[in-house]
Amino acid sequence: MRSTKARHSQMDCRVFEVKVVSSKISKAQKEQVNQYFREAKWRRNSIVADLESADRNGKTAVVKIGDTFEERPLELLGSQVRQDIYDMVKSEIRGLHTKKGKGEKVGALGFKSYCNSIPLRQYGVTYRIDFPRNRIKIQNIDKDFYVRGLKQIPDIAEITNARFIRKPDGLYFHITCFTPKEERVKTDKECGIDFGIEHNLTLSDGTVFDIHVPESKRAKLASVRVNRSLRKNNGKRSGNHYRRVKKLQITYQKDRNRRTDLANKIVHDILTSYDFIAVQDEMIHNWHSGLFGKQVQHSAMGYIKARLRNNFRVHVVERSFPSTQICPVCGCLTKHPLSEREYNCIHCGYHHDSRDIKSAQSILEEALRQVSMERRAQSLVENSSAVPVSSDTEYKNSSMKQEAQML
Ligand SMILES: [Zn+2]
């Protein structure tokens, strides 16, 4: 296990999504898949119901029907899947515990009315891929699945675990692979990023990305249909109602796909063209609940930020730094209302045509300053006769060092 871990640490971890061709699923198989997800739900809920005495290898689940409880056998879930669901619940509890430790408000772990994701841990045992025939076989499900998208996985990839996912528009597999590390071409460029509402993303060199993907007409129409028929039927939920809801879910998913796709492209763009990236930790949550809910909801801002933050070349400046107010010349603060799109310093007269670009530049400057400070403190600890170096070379040193640690 240790040698595998060491090998994987030198590789890129990637997840590929492949879709099951739904027209090739027979009725019997469809029922079996539904039962598979149902059993996963039973398993999870019965663990949550009785955490103390839950068995990691338990072959039955207690299901609540009305007011009575019934013990049911889990026929389709293999032993590894059952163990993984148990471990998942455990890690969820651990997550809640750490959250509570940080002083956040947490509730108890609740029951779920559906389970749409099943872990398939071991390639070759819980699931198998037949590349020439484009098929994936899951343990205990009779027929294999005809899938599209296996060509994305390179031949040299080392396939590990996967997830079986149920989305409104069909079934998917998320397959985790390890591939040899790709060398990134160094660009020697750096940038700061300002997240805003006018233009969602402004870079310190003036590049602007608009990541607003509005709600599609299709989705609006579908939601109108759901609400109108509910009103007509006095809130009674008929079979047709659920059909309409399903349609609505599919349109939402399509919108989400477009948004994620755009966000992925932007993140890729930024990460390949800059060596050092600075962002500010802002409360996107607050915007969401405030005046700008719709604008934020229909952009992939939070997703982009999370993706960027995971990269070790990205430096995060804390929330309290006044990036929009601070003057780059005299360092004084000038308050600017949101309607004011230019920047004017009332103390020294400094002017910038775009407050967003100015703000991005301030974030970058602050990040570079912080990195050089950290670097200096580190070198002081390591070597008391450290010579101060210019901040420009310093961050490169530190990023190189980080890279060396990664290797
Ligand atoms: Zn000034």
Image: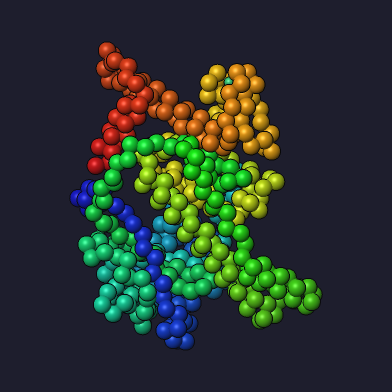
Q: Along the line of sight, which residue is nearer the eye, 398 or 267?
A: 267
* Viewer-proximal residue among 45 and 365: 365
Q: Quadrant of ligand 1?
A: top right
Say left or right for 351 vs 234.
left
Res. 79 visible in picture: yes
Give how far across and how far down residue 22 sits, in percent: 45, 80
- Residue 319 lies left or right of residue 177; in this view the side is right
Where is 384 relative to 283, above or below? above
Give the tally of numbered discs: 0
At horizontal 48% and vertical 49% (from top left) the residue drawn is 304
Q: Which residue sits at x=28%, y=38%?
A: 403
Residue 338 location, x and y as percent? 67, 37
Identify which residue is drawn at 32% across, 16% down. Answer: 388
Single out the residue that lies furthest toward the top: 385
* Above or below: residue 227 compared with residue 283: below
Outermost residue on the bottom side: it is 27
In this view, the residue in front, 315 or 327, is: 327
Q: Position of residue 12 (x, y in %)?
A: 29, 52
Residue displayed at 31% across by 77% down: 134
Q: Is residue 218 above or below residue 210?
A: below
Q: Residue 277 placed where, x, y %?
A: 42, 38
Q: Is 73 rendered above or below residue 316?
A: below
User: Residue lying furthest left in this view?
Assistant: 3
Look at the image and tell me in which quarter the C terminus lies: top left
Residue 302 visible, this angle: no
